[in-house]
């Protein structure tokens, strides 16, 4: 039997991910933020990017009691499957099964060894199998149909990054009713659209040069003109929820209505800004 939405089976127990989580780059995560996020009612902390510091998940888990900590994602080129598996077993044994292993292929432009991405993902999952990491204890970063189908067949589900509710709806159709679907959603809690888009473009720009994201945006109907100058207004508005808390909450709810089980909220701010006020406001609206 498949676990209910927002939950993953783990042996004889269940991992409750909650409807909302946060996504945060690993250098910005610390135990104090983890505790604050848990107190606000978020169910999952997605550790953004492949962490260079292997002790980060353990520190976040040690500082909390309920929240699930997930990697979003471990890069398959940088972290051997055997090393990822050892961390999975160690963290779950020490912290009551609250760790979820998210893994993915990364970007062609950032990886000299990048080749045969699909075969590499299959081989990595085979090695995790050999190391005793259960399918329900791992998720796959997946954007396109082929990767989504692999996520459904070999893992608990998919953790798509930089998508829209339209992508979530399509991904749910590909995954089927059972597997986890946990998209990331960027938000800027700023009512001025010009200022909000400027904040969004500070982050979006780097992704517009990455082939896998551009292909994903093209599948959503965007074209070359949308990728210039940090992204057209239409592209920015589609990828980053901005406005007052009601507008941001509506976008997050749209993912849930489209079939997401857990939405990973990434708050974008001015350089050096604190994400907590936005996370607090969103929690008040939806949690």
Image: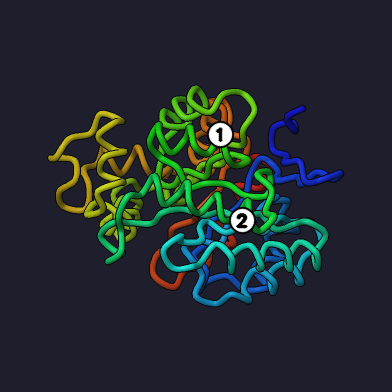
Q: Which quadrant, please, contains the C terminus?
A: top right
Q: Earlier in the sequence, mark 1 or mark 2?
A: 2
Mark 2 is surrounded, within 10 Å at the Cα level, by few (under 14), some (14 to 19) or many (20 or more) other residues, namely: many
Badge number at residue 244: none
> In the image, what residue occupies the spot 25% across and 34% down?
218
Q: Nearer the viewer, residue 16 or 249?
A: 16
x%, y% of residue 92?
76, 61
Q: Quadrant of residue 239?
A: top left
Side (left or right) of 233 relative to 34: left
Q: Nearer the viewer, residue 151 or 166?
A: 151
Q: Quadrant of residue 93?
A: bottom right
Q: Is residue 179 above or below residue 41?
A: above
| Residue wearing tag 2 | 101
Q: Is residue 222 above or below residue 67?
A: above
Answer yes or no: is residue 198 visible: no
Q: CA distance from mark 1 to mark 2?
A: 15 Å
Q: Secondary structure at mark 1?
A: helix
> In the image, what residue occupies the spot 56% across and 48% down?
264
Q: Secondary structure at mark 2?
A: strand
Side (left or right) of 94 relative to 197: right
Mark 1 is surrounded, within 10 Å at the Cα level, by few (under 14), some (14 to 19) or many (20 or more) other residues, namely: many
> In the image, what residue occupies the spot 57% across and 33% down?
260
Q: Nearer the viewer, residue 188 or 219?
A: 219
Side (left or right) of 253 relative to 217: right
Of all residues, the one furthest to the right in this rendering is: 12
x%, y% of residue 186?
45, 49
x%, y% of residue 99?
70, 58
| Residue wearing tag 1 | 152
Of all residues, the one furthest to the front in this rendering is: 130
> In the image, what residue occupies the spot 19% across and 45% down?
227
């Amino acid at each position: 039997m498949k676990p209910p939405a927002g939950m993953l089976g783990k042996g004889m127990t269940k991992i409750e991910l909650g409807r909302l989580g946060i996504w945060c780059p690993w250098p910005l995560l610390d135990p104090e933020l983890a505790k604050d996020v848990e107190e606000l009612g978020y169910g999952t902390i997605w550790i953004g990017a492949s962490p260079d510091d292997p002790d980060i998940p353990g520190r976040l888990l040690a500082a909390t009691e309920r929240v699930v900590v997930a990697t979003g994602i471990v890069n398959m080129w940088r972290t051997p499957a055997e090393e990822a598996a050892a961390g999975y077993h160690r963290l779950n044994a020490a912290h009551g099964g609250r760790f979820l292993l998210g893994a993915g292929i990364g970007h062609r432009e950032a990886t000299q060894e990048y080749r045969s991405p699909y075969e590499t993902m299959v081989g990595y999952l085979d090695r995790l199998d050999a190391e005793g990491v259960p399918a329900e204890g791992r998720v796959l970063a997946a954007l396109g149909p082929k990767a989504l189908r692999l996520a459904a067949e070999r893992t608990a589900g998919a953790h798509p990054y930089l998508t829209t509710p339209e992508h979530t709806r399509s991904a749910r159709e590909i995954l089927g009713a059972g597997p986890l679907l946990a998209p990331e959603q960027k938000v800027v809690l700023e009512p001025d659209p010009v200022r909000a888009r400027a904040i969004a473009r500070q982050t979006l720009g780097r992704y517009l040069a990455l082939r896998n994201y551009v292909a994903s945006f093209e599948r959503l109907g965007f074209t070359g003109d949308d990728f210039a100058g940090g992204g057209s207004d239409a592209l920015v508005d589609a990828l980053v929820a901005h406005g007052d808390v009601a507008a941001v909450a509506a976008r997050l709810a749209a993912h849930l209505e489209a079939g997401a089980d857990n939405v990973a909220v990434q708050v974008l701010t001015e350089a050096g800004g604190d994400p907590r006020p936005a996370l607090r406001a969103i929690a008040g609206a939806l949690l």
